[in-house]
Image (cartoon, helix red, strand yellow):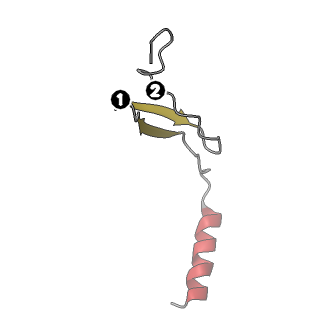
Amino acid sequence: MTKAELRALAEQAAAAVTKPIVKLPTKLVRTCGRCGEASHVMVEPGAATPPFKCKVCDRPGQKK
């Protein structure tokens, strides 16, 4: 098969799909540089990545 035939076949297959493509939230896992605690946050597709906030180091009322 030539590249043109493969491209036409791929376009035909993509057009035949009836189920919509659903993008799911992404789980970001990050590690704190101070205490080493792992933290995760769910990010919706297309949304900006939120700033990192450690759940252990950034507790209210805790001395740094």
Q: Which mark is residue 54?
A: 2
Number of numbered tags placed on the structure image: 2
**Badge 2 density bin: few <14, some 14–19, many ≥20, Cα 10 Å:** some
Taking the image as shown, residue 37 lies to the left or right of residue 48, namely left
Quadrant that contains the C terminus: top left
Residue depicted at x 51% and y 90%: 1
Q: Residue at x 43, y 38 (%)?
A: 30
**Label 1 neighbour load within 10 Å: few <14, some 14-19, many 20+:** few
Does residue 43 sit above or below 63 in this rendering? below
Query: Of 13 and 22, which appears nearest the observer?
Result: 22
- Mark 1 or mark 2: name the one nearer the start of the chain: 1
Q: Position of residue 57 (x, y in %)?
A: 43, 22
**Residue type for callout 2:** Cys
From this viewpoint, which residue is outermost toward the top? Answer: 61
Q: Position of residue 51 (x, y in %)?
A: 57, 34
Does residue 8 appear to the left or right of 60 in the view shown? right
Q: Does dot 1 land on a helix, a strand or a loop?
A: loop
Structural distance between the alpha carbons of marks 1 and 2: 7 Å
Q: Residue 50 shows which numbered tag?
A: none
Could you say whether the residue bearing mark 2 is in a helix, strand or loop?
Answer: loop
Residue at the far front in the pictured view? 64
Q: Which residue is mark 1?
A: 37
- Front residue of 44 and 34: 34
Q: Are marks 1 and 2 in contact (CB under 8 Å)?
A: yes
Whether residue 8 is situated above or below residue 50 in the rendered picture:
below
* Residue depicted at 47% across the width and 15% down the height: 59
The image quadrant of residue 4 is bottom right
Q: Position of residue 38 (x, y in %)?
A: 37, 32
Query: Hey, what amino acid is under mark 1?
Result: Glu
Q: Residue at x 59, y 35 (%)?
A: 50
Would residue 35 appear left or right of 25 to someone viewing this image? Answer: left
